[in-house]
Image (cartoon, helix red, strand yellow):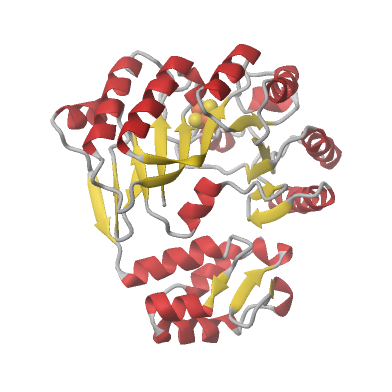
Amino acid sequence: MSGIYIHFPFCKSKCIYCNFYSVAALQHKEAYLSALLKEVEMSTGYLPDKHVATVYFGGGTPSLLDVSEVETILTALSQRYNLSADAEITFEANPEQLDKQYARDLKSIGINRLSVGIQSFSDNLLQLLKRRHTAAEAKQTLLTVFEAGFENVSVDLIYGIPYRSENQWNDELALAFSFPITHLSAYSLTVEPSTLLDRKIRSKQFLPIDERIEEDNYKQLIDKAQSSGFVHYEISNFAKNGCFSRHNFAYWEGVPYLGLGPSAHSFDGHSRQWNPADIQQYVQNIEVGHREEEKELLTIEMQFNEYVMLMLRTFKGIDIEHIKTHFGVQYANRTLQHWSRVPATYYCQPEASHYVLTAEGMRFADKIAVDLLA
Ligand code: SF4
């Protein structure tokens, strides 16, 4: 089984912290759409397995697509791939576009999972982050999507915002969990180079990120998620009733995927390739029948490093037997040797060969993984 990711690279405006590839102008949307449909045709030989278990519309702001355009893309995919009957089809949407009719129409064409970019339920913070919706719209959107019949709904929130008090974060979490959502993705506010946030912090127009606030917010997040019945299955992701993001989990587990659209990455099990992060360049490339902009062959060492980096962040952790089988005994022995330095409170061993980070340890997942890398 494989997954397909569609990158929609347009937004109405740029949020202060964003470094995803997207442009705040829609004039190339038509050219993008016809290139995307052509790319679907051109890429049919890429995946080793044409059985597709997950499709993910991300961006950018996919909810700037008309529903008929989303349907055209899905039809093109289903003509060339075997989409499983129970395929998870996720659509990222922002509250300002997600009215009842739009939500109903998305559902009627087969979208069965929504990921709603709420980020905060506070008007002040939304304005600071340069989000386009209000807190009232965020709440209304969540009511709307459940009324429209969606059962698998994820919410995105941002924590570690220096202007938010502990109580406010607690209240926002309580509000998110008061809706029948099945999934929460919560990311700390990160200062990516060359973003507006970066420039504002440098010019002292925005408070710098405070690690203590970030840490306290993270602890509150874990407590609140657990008491609301959510499983902390990846460092930034929480799910209820087994509603993990199947698409993302497959990616972390090294399942091949096809990425379509500007800046999208693809992985065939051995190598990774990616399209240019430039709409016009992407369109030109596809017009002349050229898909890959850059490609890298993944050596055993790179594959091992990715396995450790990605799986340590999940509730499955790393498995020494898997390492032995896929990468060799040397890698397994080396991992065990380095693991002996990890503090006992940072991990548990549900099975003898499995090493899984605890909530406390997960905060240091990246640091621990770096020590284990080949
Ligand atoms: S809506 Fe999403 S993709 Fe667009 S600028 Fe904001 S964070 Fe970035």
Numbered circles on residues, count:
0
Pick the residue in front: 216 or 266. 266
Pick the residue in front: 168 or 240. 240
Q: From the viewer's perspective, tell me whether residue 335 is left or right of residue 351.
A: left
- Figure check: 126 above or below 320: above
The x, y position of residue 351, in whole percent, is 65, 78
Residue at 34% across, 13% down: 27
Q: Is residue 23 visible?
A: yes
The x, y position of residue 113, in whole percent, is 59, 34
Q: Residue furthest left?
A: 288
Q: Residue furthest front?
A: 85
The x, y position of residue 220, in whole percent, is 80, 49
Q: Is residue 15 visible?
A: no
Where residue 112 sits, quadrant-wise, is: top right
Residue at 67% across, 77% down: 349
- Figure check: 224 above or below 104: below
- Figure check: 330 above or below 248: below
Tell me the quarter of the image containing the C terminus.
Answer: bottom left
Where residue 326 sits, quadrant-wise, is: bottom left
Residue at 19% across, 32% down: 285
The x, y position of residue 46, in whole percent, is 26, 47
Residue at 83% across, 42% down: 166
- Figure check: 288 above or below 360: above
Where residue 189 sits, quadrant-wise, is: top right
Q: From the viewer's perspective, tell me whether residue 335 is left or right of residue 354.
A: left
